[in-house]
């Protein structure tokens, strides 16, 4: 299923270093998590049940299902910087709506807008970075890993800070998040696009572009298979990550402590991501994928353990392995596809992720309310293991 062959990129010329630095700053600002560790708690304080919160999260993922592929084409055909700017502006709007959400329709609308912001940023961000690196594209896994590491550290710190501020007033984390998203919009609009020679031939027809993407996936079934695996694998981890806010809160922990645990997990994500470049040179991607994916699943299953200390340690270790795996995974995807279709193909991964989340997240809320948090976390970790074993079986079938 997994090939080590790479698409040969066209000759590229890097954008000015100042624009790449601006992109890094944009990424850090738009990956802050001032509300990331408290939004479920906030909606619960507004009177919404876990099932209603699950439906609201499903609305978030409905936006990428509807918009992910058109947004990816917009980034490829119109410009990655404008796609990133629109995405950042939508963060600000959605956060403002979330803050006034006191009913299920408003919460669903806020999260739909946030999902739309995700659609415009996903794919466009990695495509912009990859095409901007010029001769440094061979170091993409290491560069992306260090960037992920920085975003996870910033995310973990701001997640804890936002949770601590929410113990004073929820207005603080939500107000800061809106201001940073507006700053991100300004940064994205000022980026320098990679020159046309770095982007490949461009077409003005969206339908023609979609046909190119479809033909590309048809000619590379291993990429199509990995897209399906990726979307479902990361969805299982995201469900656990989101519901852990309420799971830890129900065990008597304060918002600040919950933020400290989840923020600490992001720091371990950062630690793993930082070493992705060195780890990439130590073996084949397929072997790295299987080992790290299984370890993340086992760690997540162990999070269902009764003792809080064991559950917390297992969750933290799972995030360490996940952080190491993520840059390797996306570096592999970027090597498989040509520049002209890169943002759209990366959006397919996000589209499949959201398609999975629409039914899975409300189901997760129902499982937790009906059978308890341990069952939900065990199922999420088990799903990662089952999916990975299916990939292992696919490899063996292919070799035979």
Image: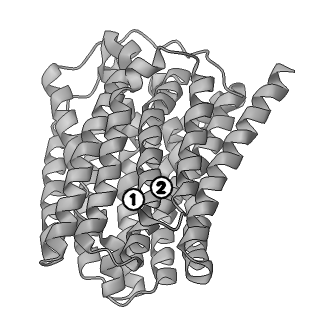
Crowd band around label 2 with a 10 angstrom C-alpha radius: few (<14), some (14–19), many (20+): many
Q: Quick check: marks 2 and 1 in contact, CB under 8 Å?
A: yes
Q: Does residue 299 lie above or below 57 as drawn?
A: above
Residue 228 place in picture, x, y as percent:
65, 44
Residue 67: image tag: 2
Query: Quarter-wise, where is residue 171 in the image?
Result: bottom left
* In the displayed structure image, the side of residue 353 where residue 16 appears, left or right: left
Q: Earlier in the sequence, mark 2 or mark 1?
A: 2
Instruction: Find numbered disc 1 in the image and state the secondary structure of the residue it sits on.
Output: helix
Residue 27 place in picture, x, y as percent:
25, 41
Can I make out residue 205 in this image? Answer: no
Q: Distance between the residues labelled 2 and 1?
A: 7 Å
Give the residue pinned by disc 1: 116
Q: How is the image coloured?
A: one colour
Give the camera-side residue of 186 and 227.
227
Q: Does residue 190 lie above or below 357 as drawn?
A: above
Q: Name which residue lies at 32% across and 71% down.
A: 39
Q: Name which residue lies at 72% across and 28% down.
A: 1
Crowd band around label 1 with a 10 angstrom C-alpha radius: few (<14), some (14–19), many (20+): many
Instruction: Find numbered disc 2 in the image and state the secondary structure of the residue it sits on.
Output: helix
């Amino acid at each position: 299923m997994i090939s080590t062959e790479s698409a040969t990129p066209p000759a590229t010329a890097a954008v000015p270093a100042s624009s790449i630095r601006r992109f890094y700053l944009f990424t850090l600002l738009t990956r802050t998590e001032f509300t990331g560790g408290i939004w479920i708690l906030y909606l619960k304080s507004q009177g919404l049940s876990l099932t209603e919160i699950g439906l609201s999260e499903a609305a978030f993922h409905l936006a990428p299902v509807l918009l992910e592929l058109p947004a990816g084409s917009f980034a490829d055909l119109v410009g990655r910087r404008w796609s990133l700017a629109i995405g950042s502006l939508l963060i600000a709007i959605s956060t403002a709506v979330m803050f006034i959400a006191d009913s299920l329709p408003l919460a669903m609308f806020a999260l739909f807008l946030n999902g739309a912001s995700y659609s415009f940023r996903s794919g466009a961000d990695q495509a912009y970075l990859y095409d901007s690196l010029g001769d440094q594209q061979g170091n993409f896994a290491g560069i992306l890993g260090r960037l992920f590491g920085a975003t996870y550290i910033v995310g973990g710190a701001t997640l804890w800070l936002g949770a601590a501020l929410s113990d004073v007033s929820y207005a603080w984390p939500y107000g800061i998040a809106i201001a940073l998203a507006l700053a991100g919009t300004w940064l994205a609009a000022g980026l320098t696009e990679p020159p046309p020679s770095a982007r490949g031939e461009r077409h003005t027809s969206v339908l023609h572009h979609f046909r190119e993407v479809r033909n590309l996936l048809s000619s590379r079934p291993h990429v199509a298979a990995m897209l399906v695996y990726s979307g479902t694998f990361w969805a299982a981890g995201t469900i656990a990550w989101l519901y852990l806010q309420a799971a830890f809160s129900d065990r008597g922990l304060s918002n600040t402590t919950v933020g400290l645990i989840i923020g600490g997990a992001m720091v371990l994500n950062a630690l793993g991501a930082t070493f992705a470049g060195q780890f990439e040179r130590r073996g084949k991607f397929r072997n790295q994928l299987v080992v790290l994916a299984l370890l993340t699943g086992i760690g997540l299953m162990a999070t269902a353990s009764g003792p809080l200390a064991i559950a917390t340690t297992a969750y933290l270790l799972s995030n360490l392995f996940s952080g190491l795996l993520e840059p390797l995974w996306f570096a592999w995807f970027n090597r498989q596809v040509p520049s002209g279709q890169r943002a759209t193909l990366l959006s397919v991964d996000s589209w499949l992720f959201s398609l999975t989340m629409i039914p899975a997240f409300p189901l997760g809320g129902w499982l937790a309310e009906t059978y308890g948090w341990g069952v939900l976390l065990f199922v999420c970790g088990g799903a990662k293991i089952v999916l990975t074993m299916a990939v292992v079986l696919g490899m063996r079938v292919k070799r035979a």
